[in-house]
Structure formats: C-alpha cells, structure tokens
Image: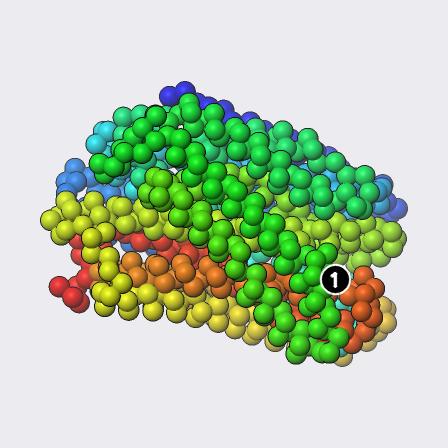
Amino acid sequence: MIGIWLIIILAIIALGFASFFWLQLKKTAVGEGSDEAEAKQLQFLHKAIDDGATAFLRQAYKIMGIFVIVFAIIIAVLIDDPTTATLHEGIPTALSFVLGALISMLCGFIGMKSATAGNVRTTMAAKKGLKEAFHVALNTGKIMGFSLVSIALLGIVILYFALRFFFPVLALAENNSIAMECLAGLGLGASFIALFARVGGGIFTKAADVGADLVGKVEAGIPEDDPRNPAVIADNVGDNVGDTAGMGADLFGSCAESTCAALVISAVAFATSLKAMMFPLLISATGIPVAIVTFLFARVKEEKDVAPALKRLLIISTVLMAVAVYFVAKWALPASFEINGVSYSGNSVYICFLCGLLAGLFIGVVTEYYTAHDFQPVRKLSKAAETGAATSIIFGLALGYYSTALPIIALGVSIFIPYTLVGMYGVAIASLGMLGVLIISLTVDCYGPVADNAGGIAEMAALDESVRERTDILDATGNTTASVGKGFAIGSAILTSLALFSAFVFRADVLMSEKGMGDLVGQLNLLNPYILVGLFIGSLLPFIFTAMTMNAVGYAAMDMIVEVRRQFREISGLLEGKATPDYAECVAISTKAALKKMAPPALMIIIVPILVGFFFGVLALTGVLLGSLLCGGVLALSAANAGAAWDNSKKYIEKGNLGGKGSDSHKAAVIGDTVGDPLKDTSGPSLNILLKLQAILSLVFVPFFITYGGILIK
C-alpha cells in the first residue's frame, strides 16, 4: 500500500500547487493599476470572453450529458462476460464511464476558467514588462498542468478501490484483470467528452478566426484583433474553449487511457503485487515532483530568453524524469515477471518507458523545426507567398506531408523496442513514458493561447503599443509551443491508441481461449478477408472524419463572413471607429454552428466500431482499428504541422520580412493561414481523439463482441 499512498500524497501536493497558482492569479483584480476608462474596457473584454466561453461550455456539456447518460445505459446493458456469473461487468464499467466523463468535463472547465482569468492579467502584466507577463502566462498554464494530472491520479485510484468495495468479487486476485477492464470505462468516458469538446471547440474557434481574418484583414485591411471587427470576441472565446478546454479534456483522456491500457495487462503480470501493478500510476505521479523542480529553471529577462526558457523546461523535465523513474522502477518492479508464460525483466520495462519519453522530446524538436519561423521550412513557405496564395497552399501542404516522416520513424522505434523487450505491456509503458512530462507539456501548451488572447485584449483595449509588442513576443513563442504541444498530443495519442489496441488484443485473446474459440493472435492474418476489408474501412474513417470537421468549419465560417460583412455595411461609422460592433451575434453564430455540427463526426466514430464488431466480429474490428491508427496518425500530424507552418509564415511576414504587413505576400500568407486554421485547430487535434476513442471503445466492449459479435458471419 506504500505505492498507493505515495500516489495519493503526490496528487494532493499537485492539487495544492494548482490552487496556489489560481489564488495568485485571482489576487490581482481585472483593471488594477489602470485609469478608470482603461479598467472599464479591460473588465468589459474579460467579461465578454469569459461569459461567451462559459455559455458555450454550459450548452455543450448539456448536450454531452445526454449522450453520456444514454451511452452509460447501453454499456450497463450490453457489457457482460457469461464466464463471470457472479458479476455483470456492464454496471461497474458504466459507473467508470460516467466518472471519466465528469472528470473530463471538469478538466475542460478548469482549463477554460484559468485561461480566461489569465489572459487579461497577462495583458495587464505586460504593461509592467516582458518578464512579468511571461510568468503570469506560464503560471496560468501551471494551473492546468498540476490540476489535470492530480485529478487523473486521484480519480483512477479512488475508482479502483471503490469498484473493489462495492463489487467485492472484483477484489479477488484472480479477477484483477476484470477489475481493470471495468476501470477502462473511465478512459472511455474521458475520450468520449474529449472528442465532443475538441470538435465543438475547434469548430467554434475556427469559424470566428476564419471570418475575422478574411473579412477584417484581407477585405477591410484592418489589423488582427482590431476592436472594429465584430468577430474578434468570438475568436478570443474560441481560443479558450478549443485550445484550452478541448486540450485539457484531450490530454486527460490520453493520461487516463494509457494508464488503463497498462493496468489491464499489469493486472495479469502482477496479480499478487499491488505496488508493481500500480507502476503505470507511479510514472505519472513521479512527474509531479519533477515538474516542481523543473519550474525553478523558468527564468526570463528579455525577448531572446522566452523561447529558450520554454524549450529548457521540456529538456530538463525529460532528463529528471529519466533519472527519477529509474529508481521508481527498481523499487516497484520485480527483477523478473511473466505474462502469458513468457518471462521479462523489470529493467526492460524501464527501457520501454525511456523509449517513449525520448520519442516525445524528439517529436517536439522536429515539430518546432517544421513550424517555427526561425528555421528554413517556414521561411521557404513564406517565400512561396510572394507569388500568391496558390503557391503558399501548395508548399504548405507539402511541408505538412514532409513533417510526418521523422516523428513516425521515432514512433516506430518506440514501438519496436518496447514490444521486443516486454511485448504489449512494453508498448503501454512507452505511451506513459511519452506522457511522463505531461504537467510541463500542458503548461507550455496552455501558455500559447493565453499569450495569444493577451495580445488580442491589448489591441482591443487600445493599450500602449509597447504592451502589444511584449504580448506579441510571448505569442510568437506561444505559437510554436502550441504546435509542439499538438505534435506531442498526436504522438502520445498514436502510442496510447496502440497501447489500447494491445490491451484489446490481449483481453480478446484471453476471452476467446476461455470460450474455446482459439486465440486471436493466432488468427491475425493480413490475407484474412475480414481483416483486409477492416483495414480499408479503418483507413477511410480518418479522411471522412476530417472532411466532416472541415465542412463544419467551412459552413460556420460562411455564416460568420456574411455577418461580419453585414455589420461593416450596415452599422454606420463602424470601420471609422465611431460605432461598436455587435460582438454577441458573432459569438452566437459560432456557438450554434459548433453545437449543431459537432455531433455527426463524433457519433460516426462511436458507432462504426460497435457495428463492425457486432456484425462482423473481432477480426474485422482488429483491421478497422489498425487501419485508422496507421492513416489517422499520419494525417493528424500533417494537418497540424501544415496549419501551424502557415500561421507562423504569416507572422514571419508581419515582422517586416518579404514586404511586411499589407503586402501581397502578406495577403497570400493570410489566405494560407485561413486554409490551415481548421487543419491545425479542428481536424488535426480531433483525429488523435478518434484514434484513442475507437481503441478504448473496442477494449470496453470486447466481452460483448466475443459473446455476441459476428452475427453476419456465424
């Protein structure tokens, strides 16, 4: 029990740090230190953004809540393994599912509230200096990082013991694997909400962003975040609901799902050792003291220090994590253990963790190279804008495709070595290794949209130009860190979904053997028509999903463009700055579009695996999962990186290069950025949830598929 208490204590410490940074943030009142007129404007902007984000989340969560209740009932009814007559697994799994959904909603809400509180205060701090603004933005990210990891750890531990208490049969050592399978419902609930949050938030923010850019910057020729633009408040609201609330739900899902995947297998390997069985949780818990120490090195004095400071956090945390987990593994894991009769060593498990940890850092470095304007790929993309939007789009797409090569190779290595050393359990541990520095990654990722919003608020509040210059410095680095964060999220999603797939195969193999149906692994043959057709269907799903999310953004953006043009045309004196635009109408358009359009792509991803498993069986479903994983991972990376590169190409030109703001190359870059917006902030991030959701859905429903699936081929 020492390991469990250690996890709980560290989680409570993390929650304490999150609370401390929240209180520090709220200590400064909005508008404090400003004259009366300026304070009123800052308070108005803060309230408009916070109210808009809160209203959207409230409405979205109502819709999600209905889906959660309906799906929980489906799980409770359908999930049951007849070989365990004393337990109907669907009931504890449904309870786990509901808890996972609620925690995911909570993580999204915490991310949104901390971001809306932090962005205006970052603007205020920028009046004092760059250093002060940097630390406010970073501390806002710390709230997200510490709270999410602590809630995830406490949620999993409390749920594990609650299931054992309320369902005593799960407390038996021989039923550990069944208990962990029920626990996997928590990961399913988290991923369920994350998909809706990412898709809905992405549609919201990109509808506003595209409308604001095309009509405001390209047609009207006014600056970005200009208060005359009716869509700017909706754009700022979107950053909070998409890039923070959606991201929080997404990465909580990754953490919960990776842990559940590892626990399903470790329950078999370490049935008699709770300390060893909980090693996946100990990895995440170790990240808490590592993050506390790492943040001591976050020092900034001037502009040139900002980007290196954030990069330094990732490098230092990776090194510290590698050292700390070595000793944790030595303490928690036995020298040798068996899984399905095959012997493995505890040292090999640590190497698996190290592979995932280093792969995460490598993907971050590669993503920065392809998306930051300090390097050649983005500068070449900017040069392409000199000959028009068409060449900018062509080169941007090519850059996105090229950028997938090294990350996929790194992921391949981090899959091959762990699988060779410890089989499927090694892959699950590698995925947790990539998430080992989750607190740091979340902090740095959240810093980006906070800095971006701070700049928008400075522009809308008509603050001194020096304030906007400082927020732009933070935003320039934040753009890159956000891109690195998306690359990290996608890479971890690929490993997480593979770990979940491994757990699915592992559990299906055991259940099939118990029922005398042979073993699943022995039947996996690429020439099997069910697997082959499943591969094609699975490969198709990410493209259909991407098309649906891009169409959703496109239709919503069309409505936004019409509204912004109408206001410019009909509100007398608006472009001259003599009238106030109707911000609320643009927020309403984005909200309505997001709520209406988020359900179809999300439901497609939920329904297809269930239908395939029920009608065609586990073999066909195996093909679907593999096809989606292979195509979806590459497509997500290329979409996110191409979109980020277009964004930074625009910012590179805005810094005075290649003609600067207002030039033909700038207008072409803005159009390229507009094309890339739904890729990097809607389709790309949503695809990584598609991969995880399908895999954990299949894992949770595996008893149903084994017992009742394949009705068309029996």
The percent position of residue 232, horizontal first and vertical second, equals: 71, 63
Residue 353 is left or right of residue 483, and the answer is left
Q: Quadrant of the C terminus?
A: bottom left
Front residue of this view, candidates 313 and 546: 313
Q: Picture coordinates of residue 278 (x, y %)?
A: 38, 31
- Look at 52% across and 42% down and name the residue there: 358
Which residue matches tag 1? 651
Residue 109 appears in the picture as rendered: no
Residue 401 can be seen in this image = yes
- Give the secondary structure at mark 1: helix
Q: How far from the left and from the top, in percent, is residue 258?
A: 41, 43
Task: Name above or below for residue 580 compared with residue 481.
Answer: below
For the point 39% across and 34% down, the residue is 348
Crowding around mark 1 (Cα neighbors within 10 Å: few <14, some 14 to 19, many 20+) is many
Image quadrant holding the N terminus, namely top left
Q: 574 left or right of 50?
A: right
Q: Nearer the viewer, residue 712 or 333?
A: 333
Tell me where residue 168 sits by quadrant: top left
Please report the residue visible at 40 percent of the width from the left and 25 percent of the height from the top.
Answer: 332
Location of residue 638 with respect to 490 vertically, above or below: below
- The residue closer to the viewer here, 21 or 501, is 501
